Image (cartoon, helix red, strand yellow):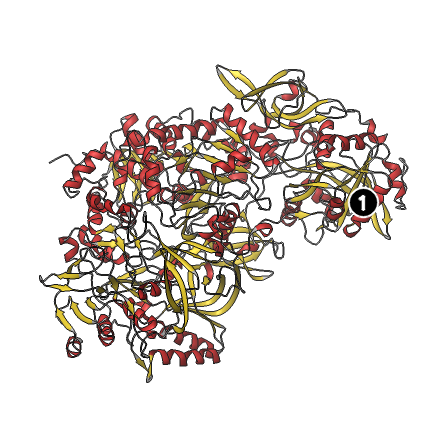
Amino acid sequence: MSGPQRIDSSGAYGSGIDRAQRIDFSFDGEPMSGFAGDTVAAALLANGVRLVGRSFKYHRPRGIFTAGGEEPNAIVDLRHAQRHDPNARATLEPLQHGMTIRSTHARGTAQRDTFSFVDRFARFIPAGFYYKTFMWPRFRLYEGMIRALAGIGRVDASSRAPGSRQQFLNVDRCVIGGGPAGIAAALAAARAGKKVLLVDDHAQLGGSLRWRSARIDDLEGIGWSAARERDLRAAGVHIMTQTTAVGLYDHNAVVLLEKGLPPTKCANGECLWQVRAQDIVLASGAIERPLLFENNDKPGVMLADAVLRYLRIYAVRCGERVVVATSNDSAYGVAHELTAAGAQCVVVDMRGHSDLAATARAAGIDVRLGDSIDSALGRTQVEGARLKSGATLAADLIAVSGGWTPLIHLYCHARGKPRWDDRIAALVPGSDVPGLQVVGSAKGADTADDTPSASWGGAPDLWAASARRRVWVDLQHDVTTKDIELAVRENFASVEHLKRYTTLGMATDQGKTSNVNGLAILAAQTGRGIDAVGVTTFRPPFVPVSMATIAAKSLGELQSPVRRLAAENVHREEGAHFREYGDLLRPAWYGLDASAIARECGHARNGVAVFDASSLGKIEVIGPQAAALLDFIFYARMSTLAPGRLRYGLALAESGAIFDDGVVLRLAPEHFVVSCSSGHVAAMVAHLEEWRQDRFDLAHVFIHDASAHWATIAVSGPQSKHVVASLDAGAPLDDEQLPHMAARIGTFAGRPARIARVSFTGERCYEIAVPARLAADLWRKARAAGAEPIGVEALGVLRAEKGYIFVGQDTDSETMPHDIGVNGPRDKRRDAFVGDRSLFTPFASRTGRRQLVGIAASGNQPIPVGAHPVEQANDKLRSIGYVTSSCWSPALGRPVALGLVEDGRNRLGEELQFEYLGTRYSGTLVESCFLDPTGARLHA
Amino acid sequence: MKDAAHKRHYSAWSLFREGLRGQRGWTPAWRDRDPESAYDVVIIGGGGHGLATAYYLAKQHGVKRVALLEKGWIGGGNTGRNTTIIRSNYFYPQSAALYDLSVSLYEGLTRELNYNIMFSQRGLIEIAHTDAELEMMARAANAMRINGIPIELLSRERTLALAPLLDASPHTRWPVRGALQQRRAGTARHDAVAWGYARAADALGVHIIQNCEVTGFEMAAGRLGAVNTSRGTIRAERFGMAVAGNSSALAKLAGFELPIQSYTLQAMVSEPVKPCLDTIVLSSANGVYVSQSDKGELVLGGNLDRCPSYMQRGSFRVTQSVIASLVEMFPAFATLKLMRQWGGVVDTTPDNSPIIGPSPVPGLFLNCGWGTGGFKAIPAGGTLFAHVLATGQHHPLSAPFDLSRFESGEVIDEAHAGVVH
Amino acid sequence: MQKFPCPFCGPRADREFRYGGDAGKLRPPRDCTDAEWARYRYQRANGKGVTHELWLHADGCGRWIEIERDTMTHEVFATRSLVP
């Protein structure tokens, strides 16, 4: 007996392959060849390969079982060009030139697996055995071995997946499945003027018509399909083949996986589609069910329909002496075709009668009615079958058909509730799902009056399941009928418990060929009808989808993109070292290394420095109610601010904690500009908008986020006025006309400019705002006038010396204004503002709250950020706060730090211990402003 | 004939013996009881917390008549849907004490329950991608160490050595700057935790009643006197609610509201591969967490689907975002396939800390609000809730999590303390 | 993947929106009790079934709207502007 092989063309076979195009590949190191149009599985069978892997638990030999996505056994390691798939389903992979295929999950190869001895100890390792052992002395000792034995393929540091793509589509009707029922639904909608998408996971339309002999409208299956395809295109239907619907989501959203794209279109050959449809038609057909008998997992046992498909589409005859075991009429067609292809067939039909028996016998097929397979015989592959009647048949292929299972996964994704149909022993759609129709054999009906023909098959035959010991239900997870019996004995008798305890249906094939048999056995074991047993849920994706394909284009910079300064190129020219602050890319310092920071601080304090402050928010609030809105948003009232003046303010969250801080500029009675922390602008705008829409008249106050439209360059230091003067901005700069915390309008390069005196460094400082595209010019002019560049790190030091906080760093989610010493509004304001009531809860009012203080380190080393001051209380160490900012102060020649410490304001002068990852530091609590507490330098 | 409560001891020896006997000597892991009319304590909710509570009530407090009511099948809610991570790296001392108690109990649980929950203490690393993140991480690391939880801050080199498949190239969106490590953290088999507690509780006489849904509450003399269920009315002295995402729905039947919002939290698994990740990896920047199960599957999750939902599914867009972040951090994983995706209904609180203690209805007690972090806390939640139900009083470790903290403002804000769930 | 019909923009994908809590909550005055303030800040209806929710059409018109939907089936019954 020869096993599987390619047979000569005679027109009837090989409709899907092109014998003129030979494709070379290798399997487990052995060179082989196939034809264009082959799947990897078809090519392997054509080369006589029976063993393609070893089973998960018992390392039993496994062969190709099906011809489609429901394949449980033929999972192979596949390498081709840039692509490495450690778990490729051979039945779905199109064969391509130069593919390197390896069997998986064997120590060695599928043919010679050194772990095959495990099967001898099967009786000691039933389902769930690991819950009962590996406990003493501890699990970790066994875990390494368990992990090494598990898993199918292998991934390593060199594994890379090329990029993928994603597209979106809106249609009126999406039809899933291109068999006769799907084609009809697509044509009907298209001819009614609808925009229709029809998808099918095969390379051509027609579904099973492509391999099943059937005549419709006087045409053979394939011819009929080709004719309908012409009709579909003429009607404007968008057709996608090699495309699987992997999930149905809310409101008729469908996710599709398109495969087989040429490398020019997409490196990994796949494209993800997200489709929204007005209505969806599910015409996904049905898949065949296996039969239950002893050693039904042996290579050489295959689904009958798959055998037919390999023959018709790929010209691969899977066996020479074939036992066709069936519970229904559909397998007879397989026997006829195999016989015509030169095989010798015996049909073993478990029913006592079939209308097709006589015709089969007339064609020379031996038909045994009322009989079934007791066990498959053979060592590593099928060599024969023993029947229940006692007869033994020689065979190299057992083609099984236990009935058909409608594919209703997507219906279940859409929250449909299936019901059990006794007539065909299968789950069929039950409840209605709005916007979704199920048609054709996916509905469990294949005749005009929606009743099932005799092709479907009835309840699974459980005789062998109870009489024999080694009967497989889930091939991929090595779950046998005895495992289900055990689960029931231990009361894992609900469907979900059964599944989780035995792992039946939880493999990569999602139990497509095992669920119904499992339910039937569970029902029999618990003495219930199958309809009473219940169903497990089907979860997306319908077939496993590559992570690279799901991630699509959201990789690298496109995943959470950074935001950049308008003048970034100028900073790069200046030698800036960039860092990400939040999602903003900003100059940390200018120069080769961090030693630049102290230099930059020196310029800012003693000469003149220029800083790109463009990332600060500039949110315009405009209208008659603008002042009222800002009074509600800010802790300090802004309505009392005079035009042309600025005021620093805290904005609270409703929790009373500081949400952000910023400086508000009043340009005119009804026009304010709110600045806020860089990196927090979107949140601040949203915060303003939320309260605007909740409490104010939308026609009387508007918010305009102008942050991206303006660039702000800050010039700081004792010489800053001279630099600003050289900009010729046309605004008066004398201190009387432009005092600290005031602003004037001027021009720069003919465009409007704002010059404000506001300082984050503690020195005399001017912030000049110009239209963003003039940022580089302004910067260069300031530089030409002698200002030195400083970066974010230097700014961090300068403001720390002054005790100016960074909200979110020097404040946490609980810090309220009175914790940082700002008490006025809490004590005095009576009008409503965000967070007002939260400032008076028991929590807000209690003693021991963390308060902002300065910390003077005892030594010459800065105390690391994140160190906690600690106190000892009854033998237990307790944290009383943390260091939030800490650096070396070039101006003072010693370390300075800020922190939040419990009751800190009442403990000034105390020396505390600070704990940092096992090292202790000591420091004294001091006022948070280390330099120039009177602020004289602002006016210097 | 042995007493139906008798459990066959699990061991390699009993496995061997039963292997010779065709597995015929195993007994039900737990019995399905019919509800009686009255009990000492009724626990509503047959997830990990409910089952653990029932066990500890019987075991530690000797409460004789305990019923556990589960509307579906036990362990079918979040306990059966989570990503199995167990850790205690929390910021505030009250949280640290709670979750660390849980880790300690998990360490001894397999032996205590005679059920292999497969607790694998393979450690956890939370990656810092920038210097600023590392600084915040130092703040958290010191908090934890002071709270008595051993935590280390790792260098970039050490981090890459622990997870060699992390992208170490200079152009990755998520550079590895360092990490926070808890070595004692790990994973466990979530179903086994539920089944192990169920078996042990059943052995102690707890009535486990499945397919029993609470449909109403009956007051008696100002206290909760009985629950109406799909299988009859059941009275008890005290009632405990441990129903996670369904807490608000049940509370509504009892006439009160909770500070809880139910969202979907997704989880997903890849196809199984040979061992390639030996520790748990988290990133708070992108919210993704991943580990590799003993079956070889990558188990991963990410941020919540912030849309109120009881559907247990989640949107594909969030699935994509989690996977995109994963493959950006681990380029080799792009070759793997997503095998299955699902969701649970998580009961989040405003401070990401649980609620344990009395409800506004006398006689009805709460164990909820665990949000995305319930699985790791099962033994602690169970122990503390059992204490509350047995004595009517708080345990010192549960007191800070009382519902009243919202009124006083004394919340335990793990939501913003830099801890990722 | 949900589709929300914004009253201003028409049907848009859910990725454009942000959830913002229960609709219909009134902000108590300054002199309310701690309990009343806590109820406003923390209590949630968290309905299992029909809910009235606040959503922001962040990547569209930028308006806060109310969506009446079912949290068990994701059916959307109505959306309305908050401003009459």
User: Residue A765 location, x and y as percent?
Assistant: 81, 36
Q: Along the line of sight, which residue is nearer the eye, A535 or A509?
A: A509
Residue highlighted by disc 1: A779
Residue A430 left/right relative to A605: left
Q: Along the line of sight, which residue is nearer the eye, B392 or A483?
A: A483
| Residue B351 visible at all | no
Q: Is residue A65 above or below residue B81?
A: below
How many numbered discs, if any? Answer: 1
Q: Quadrant of the N terminus of chain A?
A: bottom left
Label 1 secondary element: helix
Q: Quadrant of the C terminus of chain A?
A: top right
User: Residue A73 location, x and y as percent?
Assistant: 31, 56
Residue A287 left/right relative to A626: left
Q: Is residue B172 above or below residue B117?
A: below
Q: Residue at x 80, y 30 (%)?
A: A605
Q: Is residue A796 above or below residue A682?
A: above
Residue A831 left/right relative to A646: left
Chain letter of disc 1 in the image: A
User: Residue A167 location, x and y as percent?
Assistant: 53, 63
User: Residue A737 location, x and y as percent?
Assistant: 89, 38
Q: Which image quadrant is residue A256 in?
A: bottom left
Q: Is residue A529 above or below residue B203?
A: below
Q: Amino acid at mark 1?
A: Trp
